[in-house]
Image (cartoon, rainbow, N blue to C red):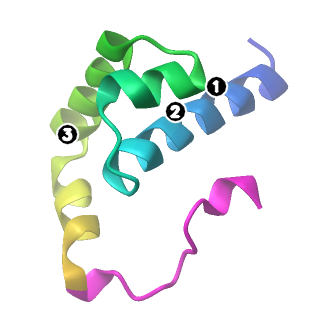
Amino acid sequence: MNAKSERAKDERILMALHLVEVEGLTNAKAGEAVGMTKNALIGIRNRINNECNAIYDLCRKPNHKDGGMPLMWWVR
């Protein structure tokens, strides 16, 4: 894959994660919105939870949500 297609793939994944975590959509609806299957999105979310559990936990703590990164920062 070239850099442009990698970036597009990353942006799709970030948008899907945003739709589930922030907007409250189901995996199926978020996947549909970005052109992924429900199971593909579940797999991605599981990998994030398993591989980056410590970082993921830190990011979810309310004290760490200081507004340093705006919502949907990757599309700006």
Residue 7 percent across, percent down from the top left:
72, 33
Which residue is rendered at x = 17% and y = 48% of the image?
53
Q: Is residue 67 magenta?
A: yes
Q: Disc 1 marks which amino acid? A: Lys
Circle 3 is placed at which residue position?
Answer: 49
Identify residue type, mark 2: Ile
Q: Are marks 2 and 1 in contact (CB under 8 Å)?
A: yes
Locate residue 61 relative to residue 73 in the image: left or right. left
| 73 shown above or below 29 | below
Position of the N terminus, as image quadrant, is top right
Q: Which residues are magenta?
A: 63-76
Instruction: Say which quarter of the image contains residue 74.
Output: bottom right
Pair 3/2: label in front: 2
Q: In terms of sequence position, does the residue under pointer 3 or pointer 1 come before the other?
A: 1
Which residue, given by chain and number where applicable, does mark 2 sit on?
Answer: 13
Give the CA separation, mark 3 to mark 1.
Answer: 19 Å
At 72% from the left edge and 29% from the top edge, which residue is drawn?
Answer: 8
Distance from Cα at disc 3 to Cα at disc 2: 14 Å
The x and y percentages for residue 58 are 21, 68
Q: Residue at x 44, y 31 (%)?
A: 30
Q: Position of residue 72 (x, y in %)?
A: 60, 59
